[in-house]
Image: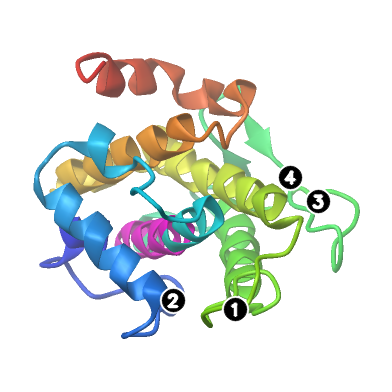
C-alpha cells in the first residue's frame, strides 16, 4: 500500500487518485493498510469477511495505481526517449500501445510515451463513476472485473520495465526495498484472485518465484 511510500519523495508521475474519506472504500483501504502493517502480505490481500469482491479489487487497484505512479515518478529522469526508445521488459519483451478507443491499432513508441498513455488511460478508467463507483449503493458494472484485469495487466508492465531497464537507478535512489515490497504485494494480490494470466507475468517470472517462495 501507499503505507510503504509514506516517507518518500512526494513526486508522482500523474496526480494521485484519492479515495474519498468517510466512504466505505476508504474504510476498506484503512483496513488493508492496517493488515499490511502486520508485515504479512499474503494475509493482507485476502478478501475481508463479508466484503464485496468488486469493491475490494477496486480499492486495491486504485492503491496499486498510486504506488506505481510514485515509484515511476522517482525514476522519470532516467527513463527518456533516448534511453528507452521502445517500451520493453528486457531484450525478449516489447510492448506496443493500443487502448481500443483513441488508438485502435497497436503503435510502437518509447517507454516514457507508452507509460504516459498507460497511466492516463488507467486514470480515465478510475475516474469513470460508471466503472469505479465511489458512492454507496451504486453497483459495479457487469464488465468491472474484466476492466480491472486489463488495468492490472498493464500496470504490471510498468513494474517489468522498471525492474529490467532501471533497477540500477532504483538502487542508486535506495528505493529497492519499496519497489520489492510494492511488487510483492501486487503479485500476491493478483495471484489471490487470479487477475493476470500467467503468460503476462513471464518477464518477471524468476523474480516472482524468488519473492513469493518463502511465503508459501
Mark 4–mark 2 Cα distance, whole angstroms, equals 25 Å
Residue at 55% x, 47% y: name it. 152
Q: Nearer the viewer, mark 3 or mark 2?
A: 2
Sequence-first tag of 2 and 1: 2
Q: Residue 120, relative to residue 56: is it above or below?
A: below
SS type, badge 4: loop
Horizontal arrangement in the rendering, residue 44 relative to residue 105 (left or right):
left
Mark 4–mark 3 Cα distance, whole angstroms, equals 5 Å
Mark 3 Cα-neighbour bin, 10 Å: few <14, some 14–19, many ≥20: few
Residue at 32% x, 57% y: name it. 71
Sequence-first tag of 3 and 2: 2
Mark 1–mark 3 Cα distance, whole angstroms, equals 25 Å
Q: Which residue is mark 1?
A: 127
Mark 1–mark 4 Cα distance, whole angstroms, equals 24 Å
Q: Which residue is mark 2?
A: 17
Q: Which residue is mark 4?
A: 96
Amino acid at each position: 500500500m501507499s503505507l510503504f511510500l509514506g516517507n518518500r519523495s512526494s513526486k508522482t508521475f500523474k496526480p494521485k487518485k484519492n479515495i474519498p474519506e468517510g466512504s466505505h472504500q476508504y474504510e476498506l483501504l484503512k483496513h488493508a493498510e492496517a493488515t499490511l502493517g502486520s508485515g504479512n502480505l499474503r494475509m493482507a490481500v485476502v478478501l475481508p469477511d463479508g466484503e464485496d469482491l468488486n469493491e475490494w479489487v477496486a480499492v486495491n487497484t486504485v492503491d496499486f495505481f498510486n504506488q506505481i505512479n510514485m515509484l515511476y515518478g522517482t525514476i522519470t529522469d532516467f527513463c527518456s526517449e533516448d534511453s528507452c526508445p521502445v517500451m520493453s521488459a528486457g531484450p525478449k519483451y516489447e510492448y506496443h500501445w493500443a487502448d481500443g478507443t483513441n488508438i485502435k491499432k497497436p503503435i510502437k513508441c518509447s517507454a516514457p510515451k507508452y507509460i504516459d498513455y498507460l497511466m492516463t488511460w488507467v486514470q480515465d478508467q478510475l475516474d469513470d463513476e460508471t466503472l469505479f463507483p465511489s458512492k454507496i449503493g451504486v453497483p459495479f458494472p457487469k464488465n468491472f472485473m474484466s476492466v480491472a484485469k486489463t488495468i492490472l495487466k498493464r500496470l504490471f508492465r510498468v513494474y517489468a520495465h522498471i525492474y529490467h531497464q532501471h533497477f540500477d537507478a532504483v538502487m542508486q535512489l535506495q528505493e529497492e526495498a519499496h519497489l520489492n515490497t510494492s511488487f510483492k504485494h501486487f503479485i500476491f494480490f493478483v495471484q489471490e484472485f487470479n487477475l493476470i494470466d500467467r503468460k503476462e507475468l513471464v518477464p518477471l517470472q524468476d523474480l516472482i518465484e524468488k519473492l513469493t517462495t518463502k511465503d508459501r
